[in-house]
Image: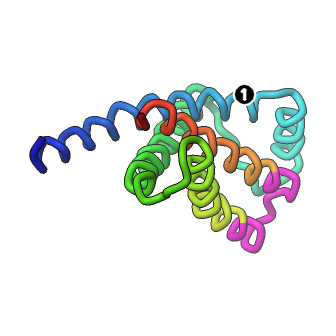
Amino acid sequence: MDYQDKENLMFATILLWGAVAGVVHFVLIGMLYGNPVVGRMYGAAATESPAMKHWTSKPKYMVTQFLGTQVEVYLLTIAFLWLRPLVAVPAYSGALLIGALLAAIRVYPRYWNMWIQTTYPNRLLATEAINGSIGTLAIALFLQAVTQP
């Protein structure tokens, strides 16, 4: 296989598995945020906090959310596939290490900036950090399962 073939295969892998990982991530995040405990927290915050944006259309919000997170998932897919061969830790342990690194890069800056610059409720910030980390780890584990021999 020549260089161009490898490049085309990598591009196809990113497109295919990034799209599927996006759906897997979206379903998982839906379950994490859609549970009654988290739903009540966000519902209460939506009525109490001016930091919460109010969407008039739930379908528009869901499409916007999916497309926005899909960009992140594609970036995470590229990073995972680029870094995975460089991490000598085998199988899912290596995927968890990469996932933890990507979660820290993805979640921490957002959490920190929202904490210092907004009135977003602290319990929701914690929920965002936890769910964002779980979602990132799930992407890494999924990509390990489907792309690594």
Numbered range of the magenta stretch: 112-126
User: Up-down: is 104 above or below 92?
Assistant: below
How does the figure colour the protein chain or chains?
A: rainbow
Observer-nearest residue: 33 or 137? Answer: 137
* Percent position of residue 138, x then y: 62, 38
Say what secondary structure mark 1 lies in.
helix
Residue closer to the observer: 65 or 7: 7
Q: Which residue is label 1 attached to?
A: 31
In-image side of 110 versus 149 (left or right):
right
Q: Is residue 114 magenta?
A: yes
Establish if 141 lies above or below 105. Answer: above
Left or right: where does residue 82 sit relative to residue 73?
left
Within-10-Å neighbours for mark 1: few <14, some 14–19, many 20+: few
Identified at 58% across, 34% down, the residue is: 25
The verdict on residue 13 being magenta is: no
Tell me the chief SS of the magenta region: helix
Residue type marked 1: Met
At x 22% / y 38%, what residue is drawn? 9
In this rendering, position of residue 7 left or right of residue 34: left
- Residue 56 x %, y %: 64, 33
Tell me the quadrant of the picture where the C terminus can be found.
top left
Residue at the extreme bottom of the image, as rendered? 116
